[in-house]
């Protein structure tokens, strides 16, 4: 056997051995999934599901807990939770849709896999423009809980970013209406004005809590935004 043949056969054999757990997992969908099913050779135990859920929940609101949990189990950085019907969410995605830039930045600094939603929420117009140029269909992507990219653009507050995304939207009005909420909540008056002129059709659409954009502007004491919304038909929810 030549040296080349030896290495070729060794690599093939190694590939088959490495794939064996995965192949076994596809033999029958009726078999119960054991702790070893599909696990790569030499890998340690999986993260307990309770710990994964706790970490994803902390990503929405608790930076201190995120720090403690990552110190104890660094592998949680990539963990995702399935809320049902394929609604997968990571701690990063939870932080992004809650507008928690502090948690998003901490996770990014610790090596989490970046996505378009967190980039948009941070107002990184350059990244979003590049993604739209790479593949305009990214504008249609939905984050956890079905939240559209424009929802995160609202948090980011960049008019340039909004201009890059909106030409590719299939439901421009609906998604601009949603962006109006996050832009208002974050105090981005220039983006609120742009959305009113370039896509939003219902200034009184309500969020998860039954509140309108004007409610948020009044609560946050964003007087300029409140005036802008009122002058264009915006009303409080009650």
Image (tube, rainbow, N blue to C red):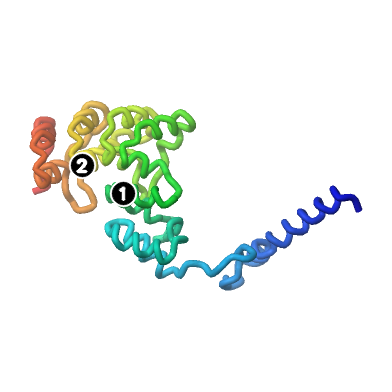
Q: Looking at the picture, how far across and down is residue 128, in whole percent?
A: 39, 34
Q: Looking at the picture, how far across and down is residue 114, in whole percent?
A: 43, 45
Instruction: Give neighbour class at mark 1: few <14, some 14-19, many 20+ (Cα, 10 Å).
Output: many
Query: Residue at coordinates 51% horizontally, 67% vertically from top-left?
Result: 46
Q: Give the residue number, with chain letter if any, for mark 2.
A: 186
Labels 2 & 1 near each other (Cβ < 8 A)? no
Q: Nearer the viewer, residue 128 or 237?
A: 128
Q: Secondary structure at mark 2?
A: loop
On screen, residue 215 versus residue 12, left or right, reads left
Query: Residue at coordinates 44% horizontally, 37% vertically from top-left?
Result: 138
Q: Nearer the viewer, residue 116 or 205?
A: 116
Q: For residue 7, which numbered disc appears in the image? A: none
Instruction: Give neighbour class at mark 2: few <14, some 14-19, many 20+ (Cα, 10 Å).
Output: some
Q: Secondary structure at mark 1?
A: helix
Query: Residue at coordinates 34% horizontally, 60% vertically from top-left?
Result: 66
Query: Residue 14 occupies which quadrant of the picture?
Result: bottom right
CA gap, disc 2 to disc 1? 12 Å
Q: Give the residue number, with chain letter if any, for mark 1.
A: 97
In the rendered structure, which disc, 2 or 1, sits on the residue that comes first in sequence? 1
Query: Residue 116 occupies which quadrant of the picture?
Result: top left
Query: Residue at coordinates 28% horizontally, 29% vertically from top-left?
Result: 159
Query: Residue 192 occupies which quadrant of the picture?
Result: top left
Q: Is residue 179 above or below residue 130?
A: below
Q: Is residue 52 above or below residue 142?
A: below
Q: Looking at the picture, how far across and down is residue 96, in whole percent?
A: 32, 48
On screen, residue 207 versus residue 124, left or right, reads left
On screen, residue 159 versus residue 32, left or right, reads left
Q: Looking at the picture, how far across and down is residue 39, in whole percent?
A: 60, 65
Q: Nearer the viewer, residue 32 or 17?
A: 17
Q: Is residue 207 above or below residue 37?
A: above
């Amino acid at each position: 056997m030549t040296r080349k043949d030896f290495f070729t056969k060794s690599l093939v054999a190694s590939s088959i051995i490495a794939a064996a757990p995965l192949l076994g997992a596809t033999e029958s969908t009726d078999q119960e999934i054991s702790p070893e099913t599909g696990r790569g050779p030499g890998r340690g135990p999986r993260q307990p599901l309770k710990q994964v859920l706790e970490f994803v929940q902390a990503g929405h609101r608790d930076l201190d807990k995120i720090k403690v949990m990552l110190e104890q189990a660094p592998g949680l950085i990539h963990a995702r939770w399935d809320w049902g019907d394929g609604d997968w969410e990571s701690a990063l995605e939870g932080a992004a849709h809650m507008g928690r830039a502090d948690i998003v930045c901490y996770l990014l600094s610790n090596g989490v896999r970046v996505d378009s939603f967190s980039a948009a929420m941070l107002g990184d117009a350059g990244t979003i423009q590049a993604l739209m140029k790479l593949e305009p269909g990214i504008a249609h992507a939905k984050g956890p809980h079905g939240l559209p990219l424009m929802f995160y653009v609202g948090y980011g507050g960049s008019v340039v970013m909004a201009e890059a995304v909106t030409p590719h939207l299939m439901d421009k009005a609906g998604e601009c209406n949603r962006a109006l909420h996050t832009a208002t909540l974050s105090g981005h008056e220039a983006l609120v004005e742009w959305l009113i002129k370039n896509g939003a059709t219902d200034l009184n659409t309500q969020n998860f809590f039954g509140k309108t954009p004007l409610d948020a502007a009044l609560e946050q004491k964003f007087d300029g935004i409140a005036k802008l919304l009122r002058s264009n038909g915006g009303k409080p929810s009650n």
